[in-house]
Amino acid sequence: MAVSSINLPSIRFWSSSNLIPCSEFVRSRSRASRVVVCSSLSGMDSTAGPALFPLHRCKTLHLVRHAQGIHNVEGEKDHKAYLSPELFDAQLTPLGWQQVDNLRKHVQKTGLSKRIELVITSPLLRTMQTAVGVFGGDGYADGVDALPLMVANAGNSDRSAISSLNCPPFLAVELCREHLGVHPCDKRRTVSEYQFLFPAIDFSLMENDEDILWKADIREPNDDVGARGVEFIKWLWTRKEKEIAVVTHSGFLYHTLSRFGKDCHPMVQTEISKHFANCELRSVVVVDRSMIGSDPSATNYPGKIPSGLDLPSDIAQEKHPEEKGPKTV
């Protein structure tokens, strides 16, 4: 079951790129350039040591699983509850909203909310509620007119409207949905309904108003979910933003991330692919080890301005072998 709502470039990703937890990176700064130091070396022993990557060939992703939904509560009691039509497009529970509030405090305290350039969300009620609750704007100021990210009480939330002021843009993307099919909690509403509930979210990449991807009698295989996740990360390379939050689902995250980290230390691979808790945020860096990313660096500096002679001594000696320097031992 393919999700084809986004046209992807013809690029090779899996064989030439990597995904690493942010905790495994050391960012170093200098006047001339910035690089990212990674704990994994491709094509070498996973314990061989660090590797260097140009910063402009990396993207930072802040991956978030939605907060607790009503389907999580009912499914914990009885797994058959996932088949219940009453859980259609499940919304957050009151506890889920508490989890959202706690994560919002965290991203604001750490300064993460100011660094994120784009928030991508799965187009389901629980993920969009989580996304706008965590990364949305503060209250409206007097005299300021702006579309809300979420209208008051959307999805029986008992919440005031959430502002779109002073926050990154929000984009709904079908590729990062949960397993498709069979479970009504994973079926979405029409785009028209969502546009009324979440006016400031951009739904322009969604090609169909109705949910034509969800099938009542076919559950998307795990391998297909993982392959869809890789396509999603491929697509992220077409975005200009370098630091992106993605609010999505447990199954999608697990089956996508399990395809990465095989060239890392086993503990790093485990850290990448372990299951997410409700409203957990985990930061990773996607590394382009080929030439997929074509954008120039925004921080590198060419040096030698104004121009002048500054050959390094070893290169100068190669150019003038007759001028022998001291012997090296």
Image (spheres, rainbow, N blue to C red):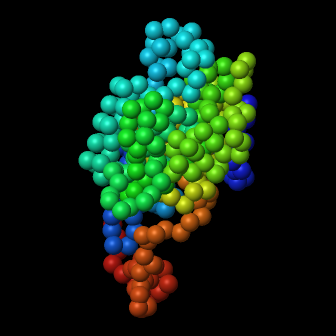
Residue 39 visible in the snapshot: no
Q: Is residue 258 above or below residue 182?
A: below
Q: Position of residue 268 (x, y in %)?
A: 42, 35
User: Which of these two is toward me, 231 or 111?
Assistant: 111
Residue 103 visible in the snapshot: yes
Instruction: Give the residue displayed 49% in from the left and 62% down from the top.
Output: 56
User: Which of these two is toward me, 48 or 141?
Assistant: 141
User: Which of these two is toward me, 136 or 156?
Assistant: 156
Q: Position of residue 220 (x, y in %)?
A: 68, 25
Q: Residue furthest front?
A: 143
Q: Is residue 195 left or right of residue 270?
A: right
Instruction: Give the residue displayed 50% in from the left and 58% down from the top.
Output: 241
Determine which quarter of the picture holds residue 124. top right
Q: Position of residue 290 (x, y in %)?
A: 60, 55
Q: Position of residue 269 (x, y in %)?
A: 46, 33
**Which image quarter holds the N terminus?**
top right
Instruction: Give the residue displayed 63% in from the left and 41% down from the top.
Output: 191
Q: Is residue 35 above or below residue 163?
A: below
The number of numbered badges drawn on the structure is: 0
Q: Residue furthest left?
A: 109
Instruction: Give the residue displayed 38% in from the left and 58% down from the top.
Output: 166
